[in-house]
Image (cartoon, helix red, strand yellow):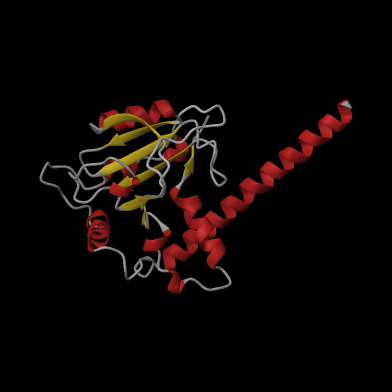
Amino acid sequence: MYNLRCLFFVFLLIGCVSSIARRDHLKKEFLEFYSLNREQIWAASAKEKVKAAVVDFQNKRKLSNGMIYGNSVRKLKLTKSTLEEIENEMSSNACLKKTDTIQDPKTGKPKLDSHQKQVPMDTYICPDGGVVRIKKQGDPMSAFRPQPHAIKALRYPFNSPYESFQHETVKVDDEGNPVPKWVPDLNREILPPSREKDLIEGWAEDVHTDLRD
């Protein structure tokens, strides 16, 4: 029985390592594609404020409050930061912390975990237009990303209100690149049919960053 239990955990570990390696590969594949298609990556149907946010972010536009647009999320490295370090960085950028719960996008009501408890989420709303959402307990009921993770995004204009995902204009990946916040803003016409599924999965890996322990 002991040997069977050990064998089970070995196979489980191998599966986890294999899954992480695949996700890393997909992210790398997307980033390589993105680097060659920065201007064409945006869907023609993307809103004008999406395009304006990208231009202002890339040009490091100086805002009326003296800040540089999106610098709080441009410089933040989620992959290299603990929760405490992220909070300190957000505090140094005068970002407002909002403690909330994960909402079901279909119903607008709080998601519940397997114990029927609401799942917490911290959101930092920054005066330079940046937003950081942190799911420190992950999204337990998600089939795609149950583990603890975070995202960086931009609001546009920089001083617009923020209540939910709907108020995000553009995502910012951990390399500091402005990327589509969701698939509808991704120009799927330039994705090779044989690679489309992998590139979209790679995009999802790029805009969501797993948190350190």
Residue at 36% in and 31% down: 100
From this view, report whether residue 60 is shown above or below residue 163: below
Residue 74 left/right relative to 105? left
What residue is drawn where x is 12% and y is 41%? 65
213 above or below 177?
Answer: above
Asked if residue 12 lies left or right of residue 123, the reply is right
Quadrant where the N terminus sits is: top right
Residue at 44% over, 73% down: 190
Q: Image check: 149 left or right of 74?
A: right
As displayed, is residue 183 above or below residue 65? below
Toward the front, the furthest residue is 107
Residue 82 coordinates in the image, percent (x, y)? 45, 30
Quadrant position of residue 48: bottom left
Residue at x 67% of width, y 42% of height:
16
Above/below status of 190 relative to 46: below
Relative image position of residue 27 (x, y in whole percent):
52, 54
Number of marks drawn: 0
Instruction: Give the camera-side residue of 182 and 24.
Output: 182
Counting from the top left corner in percent of width and height, residue 56 is at 22, 56
Task: Return the residue nearer the eye: 70 or 160.
Answer: 160
In this rendering, position of residue 163 left or right of residue 146: left
The residue lying furthest to the left in this view is 64
Q: Position of residue 209 (x, y in %)?
A: 47, 43
